[in-house]
Amino acid sequence: MKIVGITSCSTGIAHTYMAAENLEIAAKKRNIEIKVETQGSIGAENVLTEQEIADADAVIIAASTSVNKDRFNGKRLLEVDVTEAIDHPDDLFDRAPNAAIYTTSAEVKSEAKAEKSGIYSHLMTGVSYMIPFVVAGGICIALAFAFGGINAKGDLASAINELGGIAMGLMWPILGGYVAFSIADRPGLVPGMVAGMIASSMNAGFLGALLGGFLAGYTVHWLKKVLKLPSAFSGLLPVLILPVVSVLFVGLVMKFIVGIPITALNEGITNWLNSLSGMNSVLLGLLLGGMMAIDLAGPIGKAAYFFGVASLTNLGAGETSMVMAAVMVSGMVPPLAMALSSTVLGKNLYSKEEREAGKSAWVLGLSFISEGAIPFAAADPIRVLASVTVGSAITGALSMIFKCGIAVPHGGFFVFLIPGAVENVLLYVLALAIGTAVSGFLVTAVKVFSQKKQTAKE
């Protein structure tokens, strides 16, 4: 059997490549020929050729973002979330040969059924394109402060600070544009970006740009259905009529109807986050920390992460987010804790493959890739997830208690080394160390207890 596939996740960093690797490993065991195209943060790699697609018996798309399926017209196509390829690759190979044949008409018929999951996919697509702008902008601003002080004095510091501001300023039109692009393809890009710019100018922030992207995407999606022109004038539709009509409609709705309440809501959330102190901030850190570990960057973890990103993007130049700091450091705990347990504290409790995975988990954890703990959770979900959730929750709470803040939404320990990127960086490292130690010792103790109990039974 010959299979081709595509994997893609919301950030394009970890799940994308883990899914591809698991599919390839499972295919090799079953003597299935496979080629997987990864659509990650650096673009498409291992791209499928027309001949490879033509020769394939089936197509597997494991993605949490929107993937263009035009290439697969007439092929049996199985479309699932990226986590299914990580957790159950064998099941996908059982289902793929019997999957429905993909055609444009079939897609239209199943459109309503797919819309519920489609909304999440559109959100993931927009966020995946936005995050690199936030990361680049935040790090540039931090570097400007490192070179020129808090006011970024000097030509070099001022120039770097300006670059950071430009990158950060582009995140709203990118978010709105690519949410709309995911819904309506290329014609959605223009009104989506305009909606994002309006959200930025009105201080409607993350919520405004997100809502504007959905408004633009579905507006264009509807216009493409109802606007029918003679074939002689059909070329005017994508370059003139759709852009003008959609920009006018979406822009005016954002400006006079949607933007005002969303701006008020955004400012209310920002003021609430800024007012958090004492026990309230500790409880928020505890909650977000637990969410980051409970499903290892699954839907619950992503909800916490997006909340952190939203808090960061509402800040002014030079400010850091305590919420984003709690989210990031908590997400680093699971792989680091499992690395500590499998390579230091309890080597004999793990298989050779798990010990090797533990070595990689050190790097993945320091890079803020929570998925590094997935191999351990897959083998022993209850004990591992419970243990890492406790440590992550403690780390999130400690980060809030220590009033740690961060200027970027990704990068892990490597961001700690940039002056100005992390507020109270030494206490931040302490919070990470405490949470990692708690989870590492806890999962080791639970496994030892379980092993002794099993031995006693035997």
Image: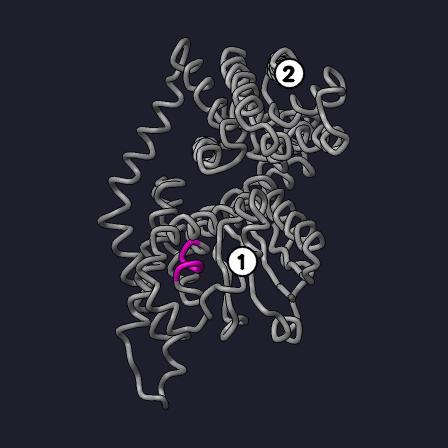
At mark 1, the secondary structure is strand
At mark 2, the secondary structure is loop
The image shows residue 45 at horizontal and vertical percentages of 67, 58
Quadrant including the C terminus: top right
- The residue at which mark 1 appears reads as 61
Going by the numbered disc 2, the residue's amino acid type is Glu
The answer to whether residue 404 of the structure is visible from this angle is no
* In the foreground, 80 or 47: 80
Q: Main secondary structure of the magenta part?
A: helix
Going by the numbered disc 1, the residue's amino acid type is Ile
**Residue 70 horizontal side relative to residue 214, left or right:** right
Tell me the quarter of the picture where residue 262 sits.
Answer: top left
Q: Give the residue furthest to the left.
A: 257
Residue 33 is inside the magenta segment: no
* In the foreground, 117 or 330: 117
Is residue 356 positioned above or below 76 on the image? above
Is residue 230 positioned above or below 140 on the image? below
Identify the residue at image location x=28%, y=76%: 227
The image shows residue 81 at horizontal and vertical percentages of 49, 49
Q: What span is in magenta?
A: 179-183
